[in-house]
Image: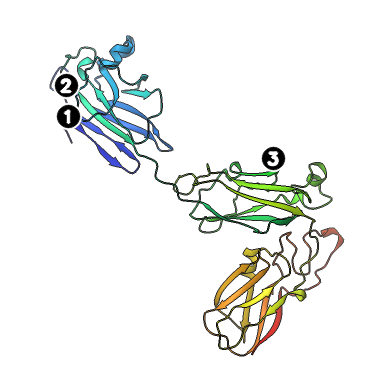
Amino acid sequence: MSGISVSFAHAAVFAAALLFSARSWAAESTFIVKWRTDERNTNSAYVEVAGIPAAALRALKSRPPSASEWNRLLSVYVHEGDAVIDPLTPGMAGQYAIDGDVLRFHPQFPLARGVEYRAEFRPGALPGGKPGQFTIVAQHRVAKPSPTSTIVTTIYPTADVLPENLLKFYIYFSAPMSRGDIYDHIKLREDSGREIELPFLQIDEELWDAEMKRLTLFIDPGRIKRGVLPLEEVGPALEAGKKYELTIHEAWKDAAGNPLKAKFQKRFAVGEPNRDALDSDRWKITAPRSTTAEPLTVGFGESIDHALALRLIEVVREGGAIRGKKTMSQNERVWQLTPNEPWKAGTYHLTVQTTIEDLAGNNIGKPFEVDLFDGVQRRLTNSVVKIPFEIR
């Protein structure tokens, strides 16, 4: 590829490269002028010139050019069509350097997005060159940032009042997110503005779902369980009677490298801790009518961990699970199953794995806050609870 000027666009970066075979004192030289960018910051670009004869490089190093001499050799301007620019016209401010066998120019300030720039290299201004011989031009444009559309869609639990010993949050995003440094973008504050110090369990293995669209965020259990050192020394992350704000900041980048469209805030109050085991005997099942596709409804009487409820609760009949759409409502106090096919009359069972949790991590038959050294046993030894009901 040869000529006086060439440009091309690729993804977010518009770059140009031109090769020119000189027919002068450097007949064997092929000059290559390129714009290079940092993939992490595409408006941090610089110009690189290769193919400069070794003798000229040695001369540039032994007697560095003045600012005006550098400008005559290599200068950068805002591109204005095919207008011819006087070599004496001052170019963009920046730093020149010889690195090995290449000449580099780093602009003093970041380039503006959406603006096209023009680098002009004049080999005739090299030591020993013939002034006015020819000019090599390379153009560069920093693409405008693509519109950001990724948002936080929901934070669970959705209730406005949460227990003091809340175990975890679930944060849902509209598109896949990036991994790493997540705690830099999540802040928990009292309504007074005081930031809660290290409220979350920070682990290297971030708890994302397979699609990278749901993050599980645990409150540090040491700030929940009584009798452990963090709770005694630092105090609970959440305190009954106070109000809080969980903020997801917009600087968090999605999988495409774009920041979130906007920050997301969940405001909530904190009530008394819940230290009782889940009791499935208190749940209320509202059975639908046969021959209909009405939803089966289960009322828990309290908010339940929605992700576990959707995964660990099934409706079975004669050994087979009923297929359909599971949903949670009323601040995760109600579970519903809408079947794919109409219900048939008969006996069914609601099956629940006992590892299901309420908002404080209490299981069926076992509270979260048990002392393993006291030999506390589950009230229920089966791993699955079966609750029968009839559809008529």
What amino acid does circle 1 point to? Ile
User: Who is closer to the viewer here, 80 or 140?
Assistant: 80
Determine which of the numbered discs, if any, sits on residue 195 in the image: 3
The numbered mark, 3 or 1, whose residue comes first in the sequence reads: 1
Tell me the element at label 3.
loop
Q: Is 215 placed left or right of 194 in the picture?
A: left
Q: x%, y% of residue 185? A: 58, 43
Q: Is 243 placed left or right of 124 in the picture?
A: right
Residue bearing mark 1: 4
Residue bearing mark 2: 134
Determine which of the numbered discs, if any, sits on residue 186 in the image: none
Corner quadrant of residue 28: top left
Are circles 2 and 1 on residues that touch, CB within 8 Å? yes
Point out the frontmost of discs 3 and 1.
3
- Disc 2/disc 1 C-alpha distance (Å): 9 Å
What amino acid does circle 2 point to? Phe
Q: Is 155 placed left or right of 2 in the picture?
A: right
What amino acid does circle 3 point to? Glu
Residue 81 sits above or below residue 224 on the image? above
Please tell me how crowded label 2 is: few (under 14), some (14-19), or many (20+) other residues with Cα within 10 Å: some
Q: Is 118 placed left or right of 290 in the picture?
A: left
Q: x%, y% of residue 332? A: 66, 65
Are circles 3 and 1 on residues that touch, CB within 8 Å? no
Q: What's the coloring here? A: rainbow
- Disc 2/disc 3 C-alpha distance (Å): 62 Å
Residue 110 sits above or below residue 198 on the image? above
Point out the frontmost of discs 2 and 3.
3
- Disc 3/disc 1 C-alpha distance (Å): 59 Å
Corner quadrant of residue 215: bottom right
User: Who is closer to the viewer here, 334 or 359?
Assistant: 334
